[in-house]
Image (spheres, grey):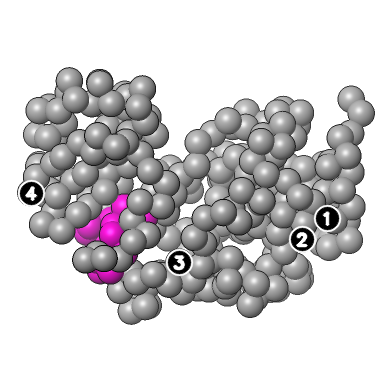
Amino acid sequence: MRPLPEELRLAEILRSSAPVGIAFSGGADSTALAVFAARHLNPREVLLIHASTVLVPGREGALVREIAGTYSIPLKIVPVDVLADPAVRANDSLRCYYCKKHLMNESLRVLREAGFSVLCDGANTDDLGDWRPGMKAAAELGVRHPFLEAGLGKRRIRLIARRLGIANWMMPPSACAASRFPCGMPLDETGIERVVKAERILAERFYVPDVRVRTLPGLLASIEVKPLQLRRVIRLEQKIRKELLELGFQNMEINRAGYRRGAMNIPTGK
């Protein structure tokens, strides 16, 4: 199979940066970057770094181990208590900046202990159109963005992932759990665990994929799903309500506008 022009650009960028550490979430973008790097660099020139925090929902810990094992890529898991920082707990408009600074600083520390100096992530051209204060933190710490440098967006990354034979090439993004809370609503571990459990219940018991359970003032659970799932959620509303109230929510609503990326970026009261 002949390489695509963007694959040639990406390979050259990685070779010029090697050896590289890769900030690894287990999502489609970071997996594509990890496997591509492992295919084009010496096996000793790639190290995956997974920052484990309470803000990462789902089964990411098991997933990153599974992917790293499948492709025989060295992996280090770094526990980071981001909620120990009052600036992260406050959840203001720069929360992502403070959080990313913590995660990347810890990842760089572990990376340097392993003899590496360059940290890369899966940021791409699609990320430039969204509110991402974490990109500022990455820039301050010198984190490289190989996909961005190669001019690649999500569609081309998915194509590359498919050409690499990666099983999760169409895996939907899994946003940080803090995105389930309006900007300005303080974060705590209990509230984060509540929304993570709620989304797991909707996905596993009610077969509703790509769901967001937002926590609004008064412990109101606001459910956002894609249009194709809306009718199903409305039909199951009373059963879902019972489950969410048992988790500690005081009430529940179904947001008829559906899932909106970045819906919680607007400060409360604005």
Does the magenta portion include 133? no
Q: CA distance from mark 4 to mark 1?
A: 50 Å
| Badge 4 element | loop
Check disc 3 and give the amino acid type: Cys
Query: Residue 114 in the image: x percent, y percent?
Result: 71, 68
First reached walking from the N terminus: tag 4 or tag 3: 3
* Mark 3 or 1: the one toward you: 3
Quick one: label 1, few (<14), some, or many (20+) residues within 10 Å? many
**Residue for badge 2:** 20
**Residue for badge 1:** 14
Judged left or right of residue 6, residue 125 is left
Quarter of the figure that contains the N terminus: top right
Judged left or right of residue 14, residue 160 is left
- The residue shown at (71%, 59%) is 145
* Mark 1 or 2: the one toward you: 1
Q: CA distance from mark 1 to mark 2?
A: 8 Å
Judged left or right of residue 236, residue 79 is right
Q: CA distance from mark 3 to mark 1?
A: 27 Å
**Residue for badge 3:** 96
Check disc 4 and give the amino acid type: Gln
**Residue for badge 4:** 250
- The residue shown at (72%, 31%) is 159
- The residue shown at (75%, 67%) is 118
Quick one: label 4, few (<14), some, or many (20+) residues within 10 Å? some
Quick one: label 2, few (<14), some, or many (20+) residues within 10 Å? many
Check disc 2 and give the amino acid type: Val
First reached walking from the N terminus: tag 4 or tag 1: 1
Query: Residue 72 in the image: x percent, y percent?
Result: 71, 42
In magenta, the rendered stretch is 177-192
Q: CA distance from mark 4 to mark 3?
A: 28 Å
Q: Is residue 124 above or below residue 169?
A: below
